[in-house]
Amino acid sequence: MSTTPTSEHQQLAAALTEGLALIAASGSSEDLRGVMSSLTGKKGPIAALKSSLGKVADIEARKELGQLVNEALVTLQQASEAHSRTLRAGEFAAQIASERLDISEVAMSAQATRRRGRMHLVTQATERLEDVFIGLGFQIAEGPEVETDFYNFEALNMPPSHPARSMWDTLFIESDVEGSVVLRTHTSPVQIRVMQDWPPPIYAVMPGRVFRKETPDATHMPVFHQIEGLVIDRGITFADLAGTIESFTKAFFGEGFTSRLRPSYFPFTEPSAEFDIRRPDGSWIELGGCGMVHPHVLRAGGLDPDEWSGFAFGFGIDRMAKERHGVDDIRDMYSDDIRFTEQFS
Ligand code: PHE
């Protein structure tokens, strides 16, 4: 049914045109919300038209006008939503741009103020340890962090289900044969790799990252560092082991320091010991484990125990760095907080 335009129709058309223009002119999401609430709110032009509907005498004309009013509302709503999406995209892009950090600018300003990065405390300790051992005639070797059960346990005289395996809380890697691939729990597997790869005599140290299923606290991290030592030669005795530990102690810590060995147990050394370092003030630092390489381990490394003998040792590097710099909480060393690092520059 067609009707001739009434003044209500004209008012509605005008309100719609003006409303659409106001929406299009809104420059921000906030403006748009304001425009919409004044257009569609109780005091807005649409509400005024709705309340004047009652005055339209003809029922059909009233129905038609009512419908047109609703359609106008929907049109305004849709226009608002479309414009809002555009506005929000622009606003998001602007936010990203304002929060953007230009790394090259940071680097340039660091250069301008002569602020330089530092080597991590553990890296510094590792390099010093390597220097000292190179000075004692050792070579440096490295092995993989993801190891097979064979190198991490079996070749180290721990056959499957050997109870000593529980000395290391192991993190496993998913693999076809369950439990056959691990994150190495110590650097001792590198002993085997070096024996297999290098013809004896061997004088080697092997630093690297190791992994254990530990909850981090002030003195433990699930990822930490060890340095392993291996000497294989003819006629090596326990006295050579003790002498090497003592020379290392003096070279690394200083003349006022001494070492001691305490009987202990490791499946891959026999006899085994734990070694401690005595500070000039008489206090002791527990450092690591050591012992004479077990004949089974020599064989796993492809060496004949009747011809070759040797010793091995291993200790934690993080603990040494922590001791040396008086760090209370080992987690601070891994916080990447520049305020921590700067204390050691
Ligand atoms: N691998 C041992 C550990 O992590 C330390 C060790 C190394 C002991 C070499 C003896 C010989 O506890």
Image (cartoon, rainbow, N blue to C red):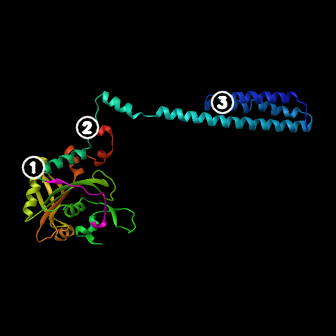
Neighbours of disc 3 within 10 Å: few (<14), some (14-19), many (20+): few
Residue 71 screen position, x and y as percent: 78, 38
Residue 240 screen position, x and y as percent: 8, 60
- Kindly identify which residue carries mark 1: 250
Q: Is residue 140 magenta?
A: yes
Residue type pointed to by label 1: Lys
Q: Which disc, if any, is residue 343?
A: 2
Neighbours of disc 1 within 10 Å: few (<14), some (14-19), many (20+): some
Residue 328 screen position, x and y as percent: 26, 46
Asked if one can make out residue 282 in the rendered structure from this viewpoint, the answer is no
Neighbours of disc 2 within 10 Å: few (<14), some (14-19), many (20+): few
Q: Earlier in the sequence, mark 2 or mark 3?
A: 3
Which residue is drawn at the image coordinates 83% and 39% (left, top)? 67
Residue 294 screen position, x and y as percent: 17, 68
- Kindly identify which residue carries mark 3: 34
Give the Cα separation between the discs numbered 2 and 3.
53 Å
Residue type pointed to by label 3: Gly
